[in-house]
Image (cartoon, rainbow, N blue to C red):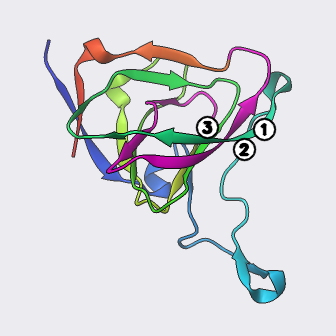
Amino acid sequence: MSEQRLTISPLTAEAFAAFGDVIESEGRAHHPINAGSAQRFDDLASVDVTAAGGCPQISLCRAEPVTLPLPLRLMERHPLSSQAFIPLSATPFLIVVAPAGERLDLGRLRAFRSNGRQGINYRPGTWHHPLLALDHVSDFLIVDRRGEGANCDEIPIAEQNILLEA
């Protein structure tokens, strides 16, 4: 079987728009709060977690670093909700996505690199690889759905021989 190589692009709001939101303050509108001692950046992502009676939850995740090149092993999606990952330190990480839909289209995979000050929010149903931290163990804030119903579909892809490279 031949090997498919997937290259990584810088994460930008425009390039990621088909898959969800880039959560960042760079270039975003803001306003002062706390008597002017802080700046607030509102509405940076569309949180969508209420399908089938779900409610929002905030969690922490600690991810082990990966090294490149990396064979991709699994894609997943959350059909009932969005899912956000926000690095808690200036930690670059990788994002691998494919368009939302009932079927995973491996021919439309895209890979992005966060600059470490950007988080991401997947739209409901967007296919994505599990979290890929770089350089060192990294903590992330997660905003997603808690509730009844099947909200995580997984597809193993290791046998497809897709290699993520710098």
Q: In the image shown, does 101 or 71 lie closer to the viewer?
A: 71
Of marks 2 and 3, which one's residue comes earlier in the chain?
2
Residue lying furthest left: 2
Q: CA distance from mark 1 to mark 2?
A: 8 Å
Magenta region: 122-150
Residue lying furthest right: 53
Direction from residue 150 to residue 133 in the image, left or right: left
Would you call the spot at circle 3 few (<14 residues within 10 Å), some (14-19), or many (20 or more)? Answer: many
Q: Is residue 102 visible?
A: no
What amino acid does circle 2 point to? Val
Q: Determine the residue positioned at 13% across, 17% down.
A: 2
Residue lying furthest bottom: 36
Position of the N terminus, as image quadrant, is top left
Q: Does the stretch in magenta take in 130?
A: yes
Q: Is residue 128 above or below residue 20?
A: above
The residue tagged with tag 1: helix, strand or loop? strand
The residue tagged with tag 2: helix, strand or loop? loop
- Residue 47's label in the rendered image is 2
What amino acid does circle 1 point to? Pro
The residue tagged with tag 3: helix, strand or loop? loop
Q: In the image shown, does 147 or 19 lie closer to the viewer?
A: 147
Q: Position of residue 146 (x, y in %)?
A: 76, 29
Q: In the image shown, does 22 or 93 lie closer to the viewer?
A: 93
Q: Position of residue 89 (x, y in %)?
A: 50, 60
Q: Cβ–Cβ below 8 Å for labels 1 and 3? A: no
Of marks 1 and 2, which one's residue comes earlier in the chain?
2
Of marks 1 and 3, which one's residue comes earlier in the chain?
1
Q: Determine the residue positioned at 64% across, 32% down.
A: 124
What amino acid does circle 3 point to? Arg
Where does label 3 land, which residue? 123
Would you call the spot at circle 2 few (<14 residues within 10 Å), some (14-19), or many (20 or more)? Answer: many
